[in-house]
């Protein structure tokens, strides 16, 4: 019974083998090792995302514009409203992270496109990530692991790793120079990686995107942040959504020949122009810890036709750990 099937599988097996052999540079860090390291470094918070643990589900609507249609065939830019499953979160693995501290905020989006197509992305409130390669990110996490005796990271180890890998200091330095965001709806969210927008003729426009709040960015002074207390972002978001002021322009900064498309720690040069591809409006925020985002993971390799990932080694490296993270928290009982 099985004999006739085998010849049909051989070409597939050969193709898989050839692509595996031909792309050794894409060998990945074991995703379980990533997840185990998040847990041993930051503690295991069962049911929560191991990164961006403190979050809230929301829903939104995206309307693409003519410029979007010009650059990409993606149905996201058709001009018809596209429903979006949104998740806002505070960076890090701590589900009780204070909202009034400096640091990363996230906006993850899933565009539910026609014909069952989806587009997922996890955007952060910095134009760069905290490491240049998956191996470097793993090494950084390992360097931060607390010593069992002192329950704190060993400063000498942290310094030695950072001295040998200076890219890991770029992100903490960026956040040190930024105020505490006044709201999830008042900060820029960058995609960090380069993507190609592909038009009907197959022309590719490379770029890096940023979601910019339509009312501009707003930060808190140190005194204002202190007065807000550790838990104000969810209520603030609900108020702004009710008032209809939580909206973002989906901006694409256009790369030019010679710009780096393979680096999550190198933004495009400042002078590169930005164009708007459409507007995202947040329409609802979950009243509690539930919502449509709870049981999904935002895998940035889930792209629509008309948008392609670039050669950044970090983007391909995200898919597997996100899937393992999702499966761990589903088994534990998903929380946020
Ligand atoms: C190899 C590198 C990376 C690893 C191992 C990693 C790992 C993870 C994991 C395990 C999660 C939780 C997933 C879940 O449970 O659903 C997560 C969430 C997230 N990551 Fe990463 N990440 C990496 C790189 C990046 C980069 C470069 C960015 C910046 C664009 C990023 C942005 C985010 C965001 C925004 C979330 C929260 C998404 C949500 O709300 O569900 N990550 N990451």
Image (cartoon, grey):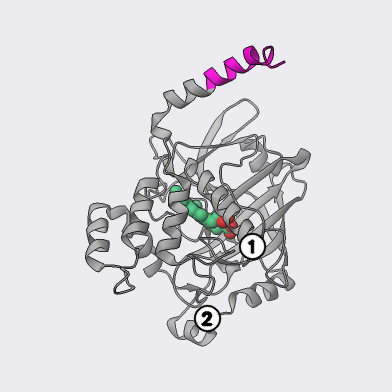
Residue 9 falls inside the magenta stretch:
yes
Residue 63 in magenta stretch: no
The correct choice, above or below, for 168 with respect to 315 in the image is: below
The answer to whether mark 2 and mark 1 are in CB contact below 8 A is no
Q: Residues within 10 Å of mark 2 (few under 14, many from 20)?
A: some
Q: Which residue is mark 1?
A: 334
**Where in the figure is residue 25, as x and y percent of width and height?**
39, 33
Q: Residue at x 45, y 36 (%)?
A: 311
Q: Nearer the viewer, residue 191 or 28?
A: 28
Instruction: Determine the residue positioned at 77% across, 50% down.
Output: 81
- Depth check: 66 or 141 in front? 141
Along the line of sight, the residue nearer the viewer: 123 or 15: 15
The residue identified by callout 2 is: 230
At mark 1, the secondary structure is: loop
Magenta span: chief secondary structure = helix
- Image coordinates for residue 101, horizontal then vertical, percent: 46, 76
């Amino acid at each position: 019974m099985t004999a006739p099937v085998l010849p049909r599988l051989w070409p597939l097996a050969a193709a898989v083998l050839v692509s595996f052999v031909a792309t050794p540079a894409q060998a990945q860090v074991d995703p379980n090792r990533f997840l185990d390291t998040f847990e041993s470094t930051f503690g295991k918070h069962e049911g929560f995302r191991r990164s961006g643990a403190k979050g809230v589900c929301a829903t939104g609507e995206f309307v693409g514009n003519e410029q979007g249609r010009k650059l990409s065939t993606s149905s996201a830019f058709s001009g018809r409203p596209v429903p979006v499953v949104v998740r806002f979160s505070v960076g890090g693995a701590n589900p009780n992270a204070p909202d009034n501290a400096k640091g990363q905020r996230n906006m993850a989006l899933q565009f539910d496109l026609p014909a069952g197509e989806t587009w997922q992305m996890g955007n952060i409130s910095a134009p760069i990530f905290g490491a240049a390669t998956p191996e470097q990110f793993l090494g950084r996490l390992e360097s931060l692991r607390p010593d069992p005796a002192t329950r704190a990271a060993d400063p000498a180890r942290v310094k030695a790793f950072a001295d040998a890998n200076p890219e890991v200091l770029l992100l903490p330095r960026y956040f040190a120079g930024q105020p505490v965001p006044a709201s999830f709806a008042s900060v820029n969210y960058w995609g960090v990686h380069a993507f190609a927008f592909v038009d009907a003729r197959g022309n590719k426009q490379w770029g890096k995107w940023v979601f910019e709040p339509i009312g501009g960015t707003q930060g808190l002074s140190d005194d204002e942040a202190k007065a807000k207390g550790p838990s104000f972002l969810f209520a603030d978001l609900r108020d702004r959504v009710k008032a209809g002021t939580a909206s973002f322009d989906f901006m694409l900064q256009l790369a030019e020949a010679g710009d780096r498309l393979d680096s999550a720690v190198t933004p495009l040069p400042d002078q590169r122009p930005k164009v708007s591809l459409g507007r995202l409006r947040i329409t609802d925020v979950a009243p509690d810890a539930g919502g449509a985002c709870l049981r999904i993971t935002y895998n940035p390799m889930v792209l629509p036709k008309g948008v392609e990932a670039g050669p950044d080694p970090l983007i391909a490296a995200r898919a597997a750990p996100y899937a393992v993270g999702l499966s761990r928290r589903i088994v534990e009982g998903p929380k946020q």
